[in-house]
């Protein structure tokens, strides 16, 4: 079968490899669509791979073509989305439902062979059936859709709360929509990319702020917009030091800061900003992946239902599509095109 495999940093190749066969508890899925996650970039262009050669890709959907021994609840022909985490299900974290905190976990597309291939072997427990009216491309967006939802569900009821979302990439745009879905009275989207801000507005953001276009600090702008000192909930999705610090600054007294974006550089808090955590009596929450009991969790069933119902809209977020043979171009696009949001690879 054809696959996009990484052999070394900056060395991704389209290769022919054996088609996988299912082990007990596994099924074989024919991949119809696979998105590129920001976390895939260091696996291709840096030293983020756990081993070589590795077939990457974990945001995927397809159809079941073969069922292995000891599998129930899924059959050939089923249309499925893939939950890529493979927890051990035996450690203390797993037994209490903290699957993302499993220390012995595997992960499709990084710690085991992934979905940028014609076929992939997947544990049956990682499959979710998707309705007929959800396209494969839309179903490949289920995994990213669960990421901000997982964090927002940690924050309690959002009814009547004002929410600021810092960063309007894939996760930020989904966070804007989920915040409105969960009852936020107002959502402000913050980014330096005008096209992505326009997309955020089309997806439900009430107020847009471009820090590169304002003659005052982000804190002053948000304060003047909100009519008071900050927002009840600040969701940081950009994963860059400046917004990870600003998230504390734009939070209201007694507010919550939800960190979803992964830090790739050192984050340093000036003393006066760190003091705001104390003086404002803020709650800081971290959110990692998107799983809850029973595995893979309510995030997944809710995301599938909301995407199918059109309550969460992702069509416009898919800005680029490529065939599997164009994998190199697809990764270069996500890395270098400022307006790229979700880049998806589909069957050639």
Image (cartoon, grey):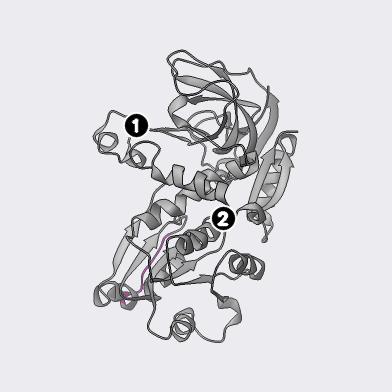
The circle drawn on residue 104 is 1
Q: Position of residue 4 (x, y in %)?
A: 66, 32
The answer to whether one can see residue 95 in this image is: yes
Q: Magenta stretch?
A: 266-271
Q: Quarter of the image for the N terminus: give it.
A: top right
Q: Position of residue 144 (x, y in %)?
A: 52, 48
Residue drawn at x 55%, y 77% is 211
Describe residue 128's horizontal placement relative to residue 284 as left or right.
Answer: right
Residue drawn at x 39%, y 55% is 151
Magenta region includes residue 123:
no
Name the N-terminal-most of marks 2 and 1. 1
Q: How many other residues sit within 10 Å of disc 1, few (<14), some (14-19) or many (≥20)?
A: few
The circle drawn on residue 205 is none
In the picture shown, does residue 302 fall above or below 203? above
Describe residue 303's horizontal placement relative to residue 95 as left or right.
Answer: right
Q: Position of residue 201 (x, y in %)?
A: 60, 69
Under circle 2, the secondary element is: helix
The circle drawn on residue 170 is 2
User: How far apart in space, not on screen, are marks 2 and 1 (Cα)?
Assistant: 28 Å
Q: Main SS of the magenta segment?
A: loop
Q: How many other residues sit within 10 Å of disc 2, few (<14), some (14-19) or many (≥20)?
A: many
The answer to whether one can see residue 290 in this image is: no
Under circle 1, the secondary element is: loop
**Residue closest to the eye, 346 or 10:** 346
Residue drawn at x 51%, y 63% is 176
In the picture shown, does residue 44 fall above or below 236? above
Which image quadrant for residue 248?
A: bottom left
Q: Position of residue 110 (x, y in %)?
A: 50, 35
**Residue closest to the eye, 216 or 160:** 160
**Residue closest to the eye, 287 or 33:** 33
Q: Quarter of the image for the C terminus: give it.
A: top right
């Amino acid at each position: 079968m054809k696959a996009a495999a990484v052999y070394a940093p900056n060395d991704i190749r389209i290769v022919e490899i054996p088609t996988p066969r299912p082990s007990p508890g596994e099924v074989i899925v024919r991949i119809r669509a696979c998105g590129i996650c920001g976390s895939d970039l260091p696996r291709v262009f840096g030293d983020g791979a756990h081993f070589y050669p590795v077939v990457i890709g974990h945001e995927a959907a397809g159809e079941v073509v073969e069922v292995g021994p000891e599998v129930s609840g899924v059959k050939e022909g089923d249309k499925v989305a893939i939950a890529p985490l493979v927890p051990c299900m035996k450690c203390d974290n797993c037994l209490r439902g903290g699957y993302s905190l499993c220390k012995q976990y595997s992960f499709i597309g990084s710690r085991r062979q992934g979905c940028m291939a014609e076929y992939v072997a997947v544990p049956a427990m990682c499959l979710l059936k998707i309705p007929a009216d959800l396209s494969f491309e839309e179903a490949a967006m289920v995994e990213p859709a669960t990421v901000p939802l997982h964090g927002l569900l940690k924050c309690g009821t959002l009814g009547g709360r004002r929410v600021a979302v810092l960063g309007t990439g894939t996760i930020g745009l989904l966070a804007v929509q989920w915040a409105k879905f969960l009852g936020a009275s107002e959502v402000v989207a913050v980014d330096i990319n005008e096209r992505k801000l326009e997309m955020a507005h089309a997806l439900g953001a009430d107020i847009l702020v471009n820090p590169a276009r304002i003659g005052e600090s982000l804190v002053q702008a948000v304060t003047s917009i909100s009519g008071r000192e900050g927002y009840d909930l600040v969701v940081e999705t950009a994963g860059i030091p400046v917004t990870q610090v600003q998230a504390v600054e734009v939070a209201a007294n007694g507010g919550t800061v939800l960190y979803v974006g992964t830090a790739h550089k050192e984050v340093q808090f000036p003393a006066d900003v760190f003091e705001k955590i104390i003086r404002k009596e803020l709650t800081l929450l971290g959110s990692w992946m998107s799983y809850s009991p029973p595995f893979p969790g309510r995030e997944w069933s809710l995301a599938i239902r909301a995407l199918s119902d059109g309550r969460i809209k992702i069509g416009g977020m898919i800005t680029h599509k490529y065939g599997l043979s164009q994998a190199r171009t697809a990764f270069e696009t996500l890395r270098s095109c400022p307006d790229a949001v979700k880049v998806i690879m589909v069957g050639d």
